[in-house]
Each structure stands twice: as C-alpha cells, then as structure tokens.
Image (cartoon, helix red, strand yellow):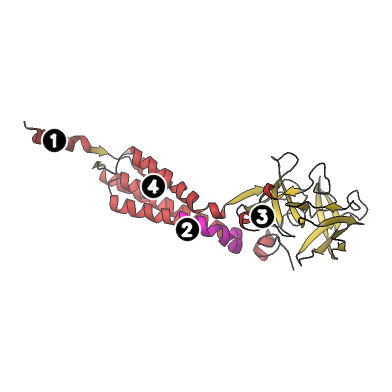
C-alpha cells in the first residue's frame, strides 16, 4: 500500500468519537458555544462564543454604572437573564450531542481548545472591567448608622480615586493607617490643610460650624431586642453636601476635641454614628488617612440582612438614601 493510501485510510475510523451530552451541556454552560463546538457544530459554536464574549465585555463596562440607576432589582434581572441564556445554550448543546451520538473530530475539537475557551470567558470580563472595577463589602458594625446599617451589602468603585480626589461627604472604604490591613468605612469630613474640631457635639471645619437640623429620632437596634431612640440630624458640610447622623448626646468623650490639622495628602474621616465610631478623632487608633490608603468610594447598597433593615424601603424608594447613589449627600 502506498503512503497516500495509508494516510487516506487511517483517520476516518479513529477520528469518529462518541459525544457525551452531559459534557456538552457543562462546557456550554461554562462558556456558551463550546458545547456546540464539542458536538460538531462549529458555525453555531463560534457564533455563540463570540456573542457571549461581547456580552461579558459589555456587562463589565456598563453594569457598575447601570447598577447605580437600576439598583438591586436591575442587577438581579441582569444576572437572571445571563443565567437563563447559559442554561438555554447548555440544553441546546445537550440535545445536539445526544442527537448526533458521535462526530468526526476536526481541528477545533480538542481538549486544550475547550479549556482555553472556557478560561477566556472570565478573562474577557477582566480585560474590559478594570477601569470600572467594583467590589462588594459586608458591613459588620454600626459606625456608619443611619446611612449604612449592620448587615448591609454594598459596592464600592475602586477606580474612582484613580481619577478624582476625595471630597467632603464621600463615603470611603480605606485601609486603616495604623495597621494597613484592616478595611474601614467612614465619611470624609476633612481635606488636606483643613482644621477640624468638635465643640459640644458640633463639627467645626476651618473654625466654621457645620449646621445640623434635627429630624425624627432614629430607633437604633442595640441587640437583645433593645431599641434605643437616638437624636437624628441632617448635617450640612461646607461644600453643600448634606447627610444624616445620629447622636446619644453632645457631651461624650468625642464631642469636645483638640484641633486636628489635616496634613497634606491626607484626609479626616468620621462615622455618621458620631458617638459610636472609632475614626480620625482617635489618632492612636485611626488618625489621618493618606490618599494612597483609599480603596474606593461607596456607591450603593444592594442588599441588607439587618433585622430592622426595612427591605420594603428598596421597593418603595429605589433611589432613596438606603438604596441608591446617595451616599454622597441627601438634599
């Protein structure tokens, strides 16, 4: 037999390989289109894969911003829609593999190609998304009550301070300067060069008091079924940003302080729960926060597990302070 005859006779029987429907479904769920490639439908497989790579990149670009508008319900809808599409492509790949039973192996039906394509899907998201990188945080303490409650889940924009400086009123997640590993969340009240002081419970910035207006009491859940009514105010910072705060009184340990001179390149942070917040007023514990310690700006609360979290507020006021991009001031 000639060499040409041997080459033409060799591949056919060996290259027809049985397809496993469950594997086709799994591959297409992980990376839509790969299951179709595996099952011998390269045109549909490459088309679906390209479509979903485009969707992943688009989602990475727009979701962090769209989420600020659509809130938790919108994010849930986007997530469920993508999940439904993945399931649909997985079912189609399963049926295709079961129908054909076996297929002749071609150049794009090798294990290393499947692995590469499955890994490319999250890479597409990562490549498109770093400029608008977001991160989720769980809040275990009440230092930012009433703005953020214990049990809240929120997202932060980690890219914001790459382009902008922090402003008064920003709610910021930062690395604790005293150990540079613990994450804190507080509100920026003092900028570089500012003089900060507390007098009788009133915040003074550059020797000027920040006006505060008393509103309805805030009912603080202190645990063990105890509910404590606390005085609640709307404070107005020098740049016009307004935000809520709560206080037990105006003669606590942190209500009358020294003058803090904020160094260049650093910020002064305080919690909205003014009498129960370990913040920049305690120099030995927190102190001034360097700009390089800022992780990101808090953007919106998307879920809460707090027993008093009033999830109904999300549905009633989707753009209100509890849920929406209003950490940075309420008017």
- Look at mark 2 in the image and give the residue it sits on: 58
x and y percent of residue 14 in the render? 20, 34
The disc, 1 or 2, on the residue closer to the chain's N-terminal end is: 1
User: Which element carries disc 4, helix, strand or loop?
Assistant: helix
Residue at x 88% of width, y 55% of height: 198
Q: Nearer the viewer, mark 1 or mark 4?
A: 1
x and y percent of residue 133 in the render? 57, 52
State how far apart marks 3 and 2 are (Cα).
22 Å
Residue at x 33% of width, y 52% of height: 46
- Judge the density around disc 3: few (<14), some (14-19), many (≥20) Cα neighbours within 10 Å: many
Q: Is residue 254 above or below residue 1?
A: below
The disc, 3 or 2, on the residue closer to the chain's N-terminal end is: 2
The disc, 4 or 2, on the residue closer to the chain's N-terminal end is: 4
- Look at mark 1 in the image and give the residue it sits on: 7
Residue at x 25% of width, y 38% of height: 17
Residue 60 falls within the magenta-colored stretch: yes
- Judge the density around disc 4: few (<14), some (14-19), many (≥20) Cα neighbours within 10 Å: many
Q: Which residues are magenta?
A: 56-73
State how far apart marks 1 and 4 are (Cα).
34 Å
User: Which element carries disc 1, helix, strand or loop?
Assistant: helix
Single out the residue that lies furthest toward the left: 1
Can you tell which quarter of the image residue 235 is in? Answer: bottom right
State how far apart marks 4 and 2 are (Cα).
20 Å
- Look at mark 4 in the image and give the residue it sits on: 28
Residue 229 falls within the magenta-colored stretch: no
- Look at mark 3 in the image and give the residue it sits on: 297
Q: Nearer the viewer, residue 152 or 208?
A: 208
State yes or no: discs 3 and 2 in contact (Cβ < 8 Å): no
State how far apart marks 1 and 2 are (Cα).
46 Å
User: Which element carries disc 3, helix, strand or loop?
Assistant: strand
x and y percent of residue 95 in the render? 33, 48
């Amino acid at each position: 037999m000639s060499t040409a005859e041997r080459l033409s006779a060799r591949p056919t029987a060996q290259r027809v390989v049985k397809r496993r429907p469950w594997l086709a479904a799994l591959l297409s769920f992980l990376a839509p289109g790969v299951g179709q490639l595996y099952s011998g439908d390269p045109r549909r497989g490459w088309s679906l894969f390209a479509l979903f790579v485009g969707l992943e990149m688009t989602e990475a670009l727009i979701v962090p911003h769209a989420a600020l508008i659509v809130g938790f319900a919108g994010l849930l809808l986007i997530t469920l829609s993508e999940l439904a599409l993945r399931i649909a492509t997985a079912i189609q790949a399963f049926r295709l593999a079961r129908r054909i039973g076996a297929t002749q192996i071609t150049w794009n039906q090798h294990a290393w190609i499947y692995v590469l394509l499955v890994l490319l899907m999250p890479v597409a998201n990562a490549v498109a998304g770093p400029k608008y990188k977001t991160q989720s945080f769980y809040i275990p303490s009440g230092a930012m009550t009433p703005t953020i409650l214990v049990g809240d889940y929120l997202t932060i924009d980690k890219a914001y301070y790459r382009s902008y400086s922090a402003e008064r009123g920003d709610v910021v997640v930062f690395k604790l300067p005293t150990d540079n590993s613990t994450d804190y969340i507080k509100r920026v009240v003092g900028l570089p060069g500012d003089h900060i002081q507390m007098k009788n419970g009133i915040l003074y910035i550059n020797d000027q008091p920040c006006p505060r207006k008393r509103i309805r009491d805030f009912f603080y859940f202190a645990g063990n079924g105890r509910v404590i009514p606390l005085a609640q105010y709307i404070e107005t910072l020098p740049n016009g940003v307004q935000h809520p705060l709560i206080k037990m009184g105006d003669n606590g340990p942190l209500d009358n302080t020294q003058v803090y001179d904020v160094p260049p390149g650093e910020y002064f942070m305080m919690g909205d729960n003014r009498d129960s917040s370990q913040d920049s007023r305690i120099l030995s514990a927190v102190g001034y926060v360097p700009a390089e310690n800022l992780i990101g700006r808090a953007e919106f609360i998307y879920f809460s597990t707090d027993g008093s979290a009033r999830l109904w507020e999300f549905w009633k006021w989707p753009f209100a302070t509890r849920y929406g991009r209003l950490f940075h001031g309420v008017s």
